[in-house]
Amino acid sequence: MDIAINALAFNVAIPEHLRWRDVRRGEEFELQSITVRLLPDGSLAAKAYGKPVAGGRGAYVSFAVRRSDEIDALISDAADAASRRWAEHRGL
């Protein structure tokens, strides 16, 4: 059977010491998680998400992932861990 998979995705928590803040629409957010997608060509795409610093629900808004050796390693290590989990799935 020919199965077309467009992308695989997972979320990884950003350890507290690697979190950062960013502003969108005048509201400051603390970025706490990264959604990583494995694209059909084998490359990774990532977006960061977080909570408003002032509290409340806030909007579900994506941010660019801050690039650093530590964040890049977090994403790469998480992708390796996710691939092992996918390979070991036990079905529905």
Image (cartoon, rainbow, N blue to C red):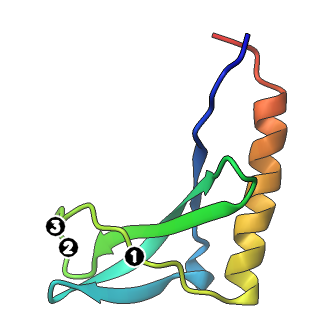
Find the distance from the CA under tag 1 to the CA under tag 2. Answer: 18 Å
Q: How many marks?
A: 3
Image side of residue 62 versus residue 44, left or right: left
* Circles 2 and 3 in contact, beta carbons < 8 Å: yes
Measuring from the top left, give residue 66's x and y in whole percent.
Answer: 55, 85
Mark 1 or mark 3, whichever is nearer to me: 1
Q: Mark 3 points at which residue?
A: 56
First along the sequence among labels 1 and 2: 2
**Label 2 neighbourhood size at 10 Å, few (<14), some (14-19), many (20+)?**
few
Residue 42 horizontal/vertical position (percent):
75, 53
Query: Where is the C terminus found, in terms of image quarters?
Result: top right
Going by the numbered disc 3, the residue's amino acid type is Gly
Side (left or right) of 63 relative to 7 = left
Relative to residue 64, is residue 24 drawn left or right?
left
Task: Looking at this view, name the residue that lies furthest to the front.
Answer: 2
Q: Measuring 77% from the left and 65% from the top, which residue is drawn there?
A: 76
Label ID, residue 55? 2
Q: Say above or below: 57 vs 40.
A: below
Q: Viewer-nearest of labels 1 and 2?
A: 1
The residue sitting at 46% across, 79% down in the picture is 64
Q: Is residue 74 left or right of residue 58?
A: right
Q: Please report whichever mark, 1 or 3, sits nearer to the chain's N-terminal start.
A: 3
Gap in angstroms between the C-alphas marked 2 and 3: 4 Å
Marks 2 and 1: in contact by CB < 8 Å? no
Looking at the image, which residue is at 50% across and 64% down? 33
Mark carried by residue 63: 1
Above or below, comparing residue 88 to residue 69 in the picture: above
Q: Which amino acid does label 2 sit on?
A: Gly
Q: Nearer the viewer, residue 55 or 74?
A: 74
Q: What element carries label 1?
A: loop
